[in-house]
Image (cartoon, helix red, strand yellow):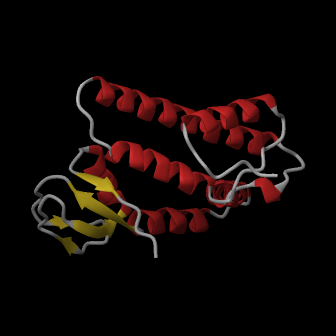
Amino acid sequence: MFESNQIDINSLHHIVLRETENDSLLELDPNFYRDLSDFIGNLRKQEFDGPENKIKDTMIEMTTELTSLLVHIRLDKISKSFDLETEYLLDEEKFILDSQEEQQERTEMILSATINGKSKFLESLAQNHKIKRIVIRFLSQVDEIIGVDLEKYGPFNPEDIATIPYENAQALIAKNIATKIRWED
């Protein structure tokens, strides 16, 4: 039986407490994270003066910390589980696990290519990764740049969004000139 979808700070605390006391995953409502997000979003939208605003801010902070704790506890259980009951995984947790599986596959691919002397394959991977395009949002003005793929990009103004080669994007991100954004279909 999954936990009720009515989220408030007390129910969240109860869920976190039960999750910490139990070795297996709790069964939660499939919309749990979305309901929790709605609860936090609604808290943030409320406007108060004086002590009420301080209480609201404290509630947001407590809810945020409980949420972070819950996610980390559940992911820790998932990573240590040998007989994982996938029906208790929420879609958002499956999304996280999917990226971990991809990381494991990439690790094995690099290890295998290295051990088996496939240096051309490794060189190809490295080159493709350098020029792989990612989406960034500019935080400040940037003149035209030449990408690692020898293409011209820009100029850019603050808040412009562009798709540029990974290596160039990383350099801009490291200098706090841009930030990576996720562009999902």
Q: Is residue 124 left or right of residue 183?
A: right
Nearer to the camera, 177 or 108: 177
Classify residue 94 as left or right of residue 27.
left
- In the picture provided, is 174 more to the left or to the right than 104? left
Tell me the quarter of the picture where residue 15 sits.
top right
What residue is shown at x 49% (from left), y 29% (from top)?
Answer: 62
Identify which residue is drawn at 18% across, 60% down: 159
Number of numbered tags placed on the structure image: 0
Query: Farthest right residue?
Result: 83
In this view, 156 is above or below 22: below
Question: As displayed, is residue 149 above or below residue 60?
Answer: below
Residue 85 is situated, as x and y percent measured from the top left of the image, at 85, 53
Pick whichever, 105 or 110, lies toward us.
Answer: 105
| Residue 18 horizontal/vertical position (percent) | 75, 33
Whole-percent x, y for residue 88 in the image: 78, 54
Residue at 29% x, 23% y is: 51
Q: Residue at x 55, y 40 (%)?
A: 8
